Image (spheres, rainbow, N blue to C red):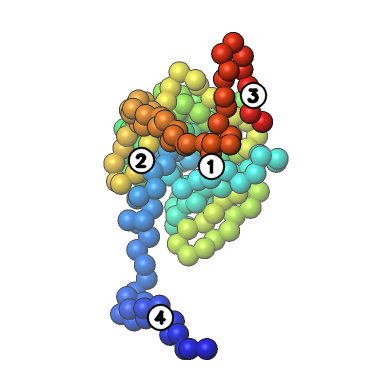
Amino acid sequence: MPHRSVPHPAAPDESAGSRPADLRPFMAAFPTGVSVVTTLDSDSVPHGLTCTSLASVALAPATLVVCIRAASPTLAVLLAEGHFALNLLHERARGASDLFASGAPDRFDRVEWRLPLGAGGPHLTSDAHAVADCAVVRAVGFGDHTAVFAEVRRVTVRDDRDPLLYGLRRYAPWSAAAAAPQPAAQPAPHRELPAALRPTTPEGGTRVVR
């Protein structure tokens, strides 16, 4: 049998391999919704931060995961108290997103919030279109972040507001994305049937081809 050489994959760039990959531009190309994680410490002082790294984990029991910077003061309170609220921001709440990302010490004085009975943390009543009240069930540290797994105890949803989106380092409203025209449906390509399968229609009758 004649020998056939198989090309080998290109050798990795050793200089590139010695540097850690920058994940930020990759994840920037993955648009997500925007949320604010809120909680209260033992003195009932509110804490919160903007978070776009979250995902559902299971439907039964209802569980989600949020990934938070390990050095975050909000994370420390959240783990100590064992509960939090996840506020999904609506498309007009970009200001709240920027505010809670800034770490401003007076951020809760600059937004409208309330604490319903049994809430896991403050509900941002003017800025959220949905809120999940959560109880922490596990936290896993990895690198510079901590993945917090939480069971959702209650969900509150407002149907009159649309989500805020974030990707490629900029915001976009869901209503604008949803209003984009959809591709026109393409007609099915014409296929000629073999002569033996072509139906014939005698005058005054029909023929069904099975």
Residue flagged by tag 4: what amino acid is it?
Answer: Pro
Q: Position of residue 114 (x, y in %)?
A: 50, 25
- Front-most of residues 204 and 60: 204
- Front-most of residues 54 and 125: 54
- State which mark lies toward you, 1 or 4: 4
Report which residue position mark 3 lands on: 208
Residue flagged by tag 3: what amino acid is it?
Answer: Val
Residue 7 tag number: 4
Circles 1 and 4, Cβ within 8 Å, touching? The answer is: no
Q: Residues within 10 Å of mark 2 (few under 14, many from 20)?
A: many
208 sits left or right of 188 in the view: right
Give the spatial CA distance, label 2 vs label 4: 42 Å
Q: Residues within 10 Å of mark 4 (few under 14, many from 20)?
A: few
Report which residue position mark 2 lands on: 166
The picture quadrant where one finds residue 10 is: bottom left
Determine whether the residue tagged by mark 1 lies in a helix, strand or loop: loop
Report which residue position mark 1 lands on: 41
Is residue 105 visible to the viewer in this orientation of the structure? no
Q: Position of residue 148 (x, y in %)?
A: 56, 51
Circles 1 and 3, Cβ within 8 Å, touching? The answer is: no
Q: Residues within 10 Å of mark 1 (few under 14, many from 20)?
A: some
